[in-house]
Image (cartoon, rainbow, N blue to C red):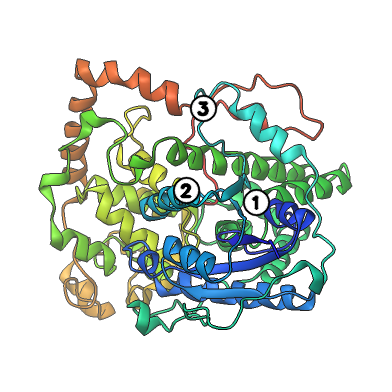
Amino acid sequence: MTYSIVWFKRDLRLHDHLALHTAVSRGAVLCLYVVEPSIRAQDDVANQHYQFLLESLRELYAALRDAGGKLHIVTGEVPEVFNTLHSHQPFTSIYSHEETGNQVTYQRDIALAKWCNEQKITWHEFPQFGVVRRLKIRDKWQKNWNAHNDKECIPMPVLSADNFIQLQLGFAPPQLPPAIEELGLNPYDPPQRQRGGRQSGLKTLTSFLHQRSQQYRGGISSPLSAPTACSRLSPYLAFGCVSLREIVHATRLHMASLSPEAERQRKGLNAFISRLYWHCHFIQKLESEPELEYRNLHRGYDGLRENSWNQSHFDALTNARTGWPLVDACVTMLKETGWLNFRMRAMLVSVAAYPLWLDWRPVGSWLASQFLDYEPGIHWSQMQMQSGTTGINIPRIYNPIKQAYDHDPQGHFVRRWLPAMRRVPDTWLFEPWRMPPDVQASCDVIVGIDIPAPVVDLEMATREAKARVFALRAQTHIKVAKAAILEKHGSRKNTAKKSRSPSPLKSMAINAQQEFDW
C-alpha cells in the first residue's frame, strides 16, 4: 500500500495545516516528528525549548489519537531517519510546511532535498507564514502577505483510522523522546515560563483579544505593563501551535464586533496586526539571506567588534552584574520567565553592542537560548539591526538609565527582580553607584559587594562606541553598498489593493524599528 509522510516540524497543530490537509486528501499518511540531536546541541537551544516542544507534542499526539491516528516521534538525524524508514516501509512522498530556521535546519533541508531527488520521492512544501521562498524582488511582498492571510483558514480534516498508516515492527530509531541528559541539555527550565500546546495558545489568544488588548496601545513598552499588555502569543507562533493566519482572522473578527466606543482597543488591535506583518518581514530577511545568522548583513562592518571580545563584559551581562539596575533586572526576569518585551530586548542588545562593545553573534546565541519564543528570522535580524551592522538602519542606542526613568519611574520593576535594590532610596535607585558611603551604610547596600558597580563608565563607553560606528558609516564604500541591501531587504510602501479587512498596513512603510512581539 502506498502512503505519504506528513512531517511535523514547527507546525504542531491540526487546524490550518495545509500539509496535513493536502496529504490526507490524496491518500494514507504516516504522521512523523523527528527529535534531531544535532539541533538540540546548538548554542541557540535550551531545555526550555525542549520542554515546550514536548508539552506541545503530547497535545498533538492526543489530538491525532482521538482522530484514530498516531504521531510517531522518533530520534535521529532527518536524512538518516527518512532513509531508514523508506528502506523499512517505502513511501512515495513527503508533506511538510516550509521552515525558515537556523543554519543547521537549512543544511538539513538541503540534504533531505538531495536524498528525495535521488530516491525519486516528491517533497511537497507549503508556506505557513507570509514568507516567500526564492523571492527575487520585494516589491510585491506585502501583496503576497495580504493574499496569504486573507485566505480562509484550512479546517482540520475529517479523520479516521483509515487515513493513517502505522509504523511496522522492527523500525530501528527510538520512538520515545530522549531525556535531556541524552541530548546534553542543561536541566535549567525557567520556573515562570509559558507552557506549550495548542490549548494554552488558544487561551492566550482569547484572553488577549477579549481582555488584555485594551492595554496594548501604550502598554507594551514598559516592562511593568508589557507582560499582560503584549499578546504573549510569540512562543505559540514559533512552535506553530497556532497559525499566524488564525491569529489574524480571530483579531479581525473581534475588531468587527467592538462597539464604536472601543476605539482605543480597535487601534491597538490594528497595530497588533501590523506587527504580525513585521513578524514575517523579518523572517523573510533570513529566508532570503541565510548567512544573516552568522555574517554581517553589510560586509563593510566586518571586523568592527569581532576582534575586541571582552569576556568579563559578557559575563557581567549574562549574570545580571552590569551594575545598571534596569539591565540586570531584565536579565533576571528573562532567566525566570523566558520572556521580555521588545523594548527591553532591544535595550539589552544595545547595551551589549555599544557600551560593552560585544559582537552580536555570541550575544545573540545566548539570548536565543534565553528567549522561549526564539524565532531565528526575527532574532538574527534584530540582533544585527540593534547592533548597527545592517548598514540600512540608523543605529538606535538605548540608555538604560533613561529607559528606567521612562518605563519604570517608581522602580517597581527593578525592585521586584533585584531584592537588594528594595533597600536603596528612591533618589539613587537608577544610579546606585553614586550613593555616598554614608547612604550605602545606612541602607545596608554596599556598591561592589551587595550590588555590582557599573562594568564601564556608561557615558564614556557609549560615546566612544558611537564615534566608531558613525565614523564607519560615513565612509564612501559603506554608503555605496547600502543601496543593494535596501533593494533586497528593505520594506516597501503599501502599493497593494485595499484589503477587505480593516487595514493595519497604512503605516507599514515606517521605520522598521517599531516595537512588536519579538
Give the answer, above or below, for where 122 lies relative to 83: above
Q: Secondary structure at mark 3?
A: loop
Of callouts 3 and 1, the N-terminal one: 1
| x 29%, y 50%: residue | 351
| x 29%, y 20%: residue | 481
Give the answer, above or below, for where 198 lies relative to 112: below
Q: Tag 1: residue type?
A: Tyr
Disc marking residue 158: none
Residue 186 at x, y percent in the picture: 34, 78
Q: Quadrant of residue 389?
A: top left
Q: Secondary structure at mark 1?
A: helix
Relative to residue 400, is residue 254 drawn left or right? right
Query: Is residue 177 visible to us here?
Result: yes
Which label sits in the foreground, 3 or 1? 3
Judging by the rendered image, the residue that carries numbered circle 1 is 216
Q: Tag 3: residue type?
A: Ser
Q: Secondary structure at mark 2?
A: helix
Judging by the rendered image, the residue that carries numbered circle 2 is 113
Q: Compute the Cα span from label 3 to label 1.
A: 24 Å
Which class describes the residues within 10 Å of circle 3: few (<14), some (14-19), or many (20+)?
A: many
Judging by the rendered image, the residue that carries numbered circle 3 is 491
Which label sits in the foreground, 2 or 3? 2
Give the answer, above or below, for where 380 lies relative to 82: above
Q: Quadrant of residue 180?
A: bottom left
Residue 190 at x, y percent in the picture: 45, 76
Which class describes the residues within 10 Å of circle 1: few (<14), some (14-19), or many (20+)?
A: many
